Image: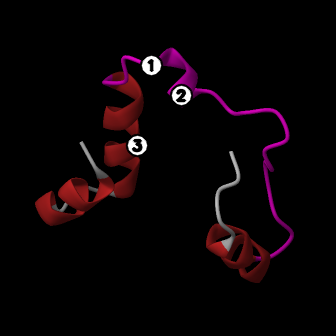
Amino acid sequence: MKLREFEARGTAPTVALTEMITDSSDIESSQVVAGSQAETPTLAALKELAREPDTA
């Protein structure tokens, strides 16, 4: 299910994430990739990171 479908259903983000991980047939999609950031120093830094294009 796509994120927009979860949003249209009014699904809470944590529930959507749980469903995506549980329903994933691709086990690698539920793993953190090497080099991923675990935390950011500020909310602004997190928002900036979220705007960066995915290079994977």
Marking on residue 30: 2
Closer to viewer: mark 3 or mark 2: 2
Q: Quadrant of residue 11?
A: bottom left
Residue assigned mark 1: 26
Residue at (82, 64) in percent of width and height: 40
Mark 1 vs mark 2, CA separation in Å: 8 Å
In reply to whether residue 36 is colored magenta, the answer given is: yes
Determine which quarter of the picture holds residue 47.
bottom right
Classify 5 as above or below 56: below
The type of residue carrying mark 1 is Asp
Judged from this view, the residue extending furthest toward the front is 55
Q: Quadrant of residue 19?
A: top left
- Where residue 26 sits: x, y (%)? 44, 19
Q: Tell me residue 16's x, y (percent).
A: 32, 46
| Residue farthest bottom in this picture | 44
The residue at the point 73 percent across, 33 percent down is 33
